[in-house]
Image: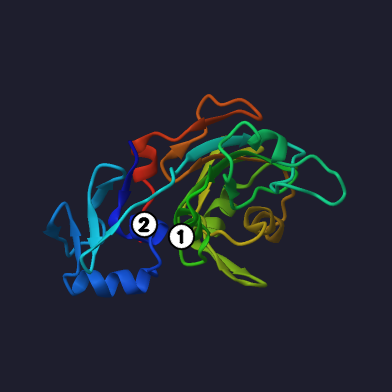
Amino acid sequence: MTIMKLDRFLVSASRYSRREIYTLVTRGEVTVNGRVVTDMTVPVRVGRDMVTVSSESVVFEGRLFYYKLYKPLGVLSTLQDPKGRLNLSSYLEKLPQGTFPIGRLDRKSSGLLLVTNDGAFANTLMHPSFKLPKTYRLGLDKVFRLSDAQKLIAGFFLEDGPVRFDAVTMVDRKTLDVVISEGRNHIVRRSFAAIGYDVQKLHRTAIGRIQLGELTPGKSCPLSESEIASVPTS
């Protein structure tokens, strides 16, 4: 059984935009199982709960899928490549038709990607204003200086704006675990280059509360209901 917040259910199952849904909910024109709701985050059990908007039933006719995937090194985070380079198409072919990766990891990086057919879910995660923390394990070209951890936490400016890391933990002298909520292009590699390091290994281990866990390269598995619910959608 899939459980979705009301706003995401309506975005996925109806013609209404999120802004229109907010207006309809505040006007009392949305019901769940016959009861008027005023909270856009009310959970909806897809296929079980009856949702109406302005007295018209709203039915989600498809099925939503959510997976986590271990992207291997050397693989593009796309479903096709004009140069014929290895991409995600062969790893997604066993998943339900219509699923696609959310966001990217560059070719030289590995680790956790989320895969779905839920457009509203994906759009929220990829929106520039959405700040879901992501955890990476880094391998550096030289010994990391503790003083540089303070720079990363305090924040500094890159050519496209400010950057600040949420956490920096030393695993050994050249290996770090870092947490960052920024989603800009190559933000981790560019940040470390700015303070004098070359990131030789970049491996994403978590997105929010969703952990890569025991997955091996190229493998995927469905997200649990608690993992899906851990991602805020509004």
Q: Quadrant of residue 141?
A: top right
Q: Nearer the viewer, residue 107 or 219?
A: 219
In this rendering, the answer to whether 36 lies above or below 102 is below
Tell which tag, 1 or 2, sits nearer the viewer: 2
Callout 1 crowding tier (Cα within 10 Å): few <14, some 14–19, many ≥20: some
- Crowd tier of the residue under label 2, counting other residues whose Cα lies within 10 Å: few below 14, some 14–19, many 20 or above: many
Viewer-proximal residue among 37 and 141: 37
Mark positioned earlier in the residue sequence (1 or 2): 2
Tell me the SS state at disc 2: helix
**Residue type at numbered disc 1:** Thr
Residue 166 circle label = none
Q: Are marks 1 and 2 in contact (CB under 8 Å)?
A: yes
Position of residue 154 relative to residue 87, above or below, is below
C-alpha gap between disc 1 and disc 2 = 10 Å
Q: Position of residue 49 (x, y in %)?
A: 23, 46
Q: Quadrant of the N terminus?
A: top left
Q: Which residue is mark 1?
A: 124
Residue 216 position (above or below residue 101): above
Question: In the shown orientation, is residue 90 left or right of residue 37?
Answer: right
At horizontal 87% and vertical 49% (from top left) the residue drawn is: 83
Where is residue 212 shown, x and y percent of the image?
A: 52, 33
Q: Position of residue 97 (x, y in %)?
A: 59, 41
Question: Disc 2 marks which residue?
Answer: 8
Q: Nearer the viewer, residue 101 or 176?
A: 101
Q: How is the image coloured?
A: rainbow
Count how many numbered circles sit on residues in the image: 2
Determine which quarter of the picture holds residue 210. top left
Q: Position of residue 117 (x, y in %)?
A: 52, 48
Please tell me which residue is depicted at 33% across the width and 74% down the height of the picture. 20
The kind of secondary structure element at disc 1 is helix
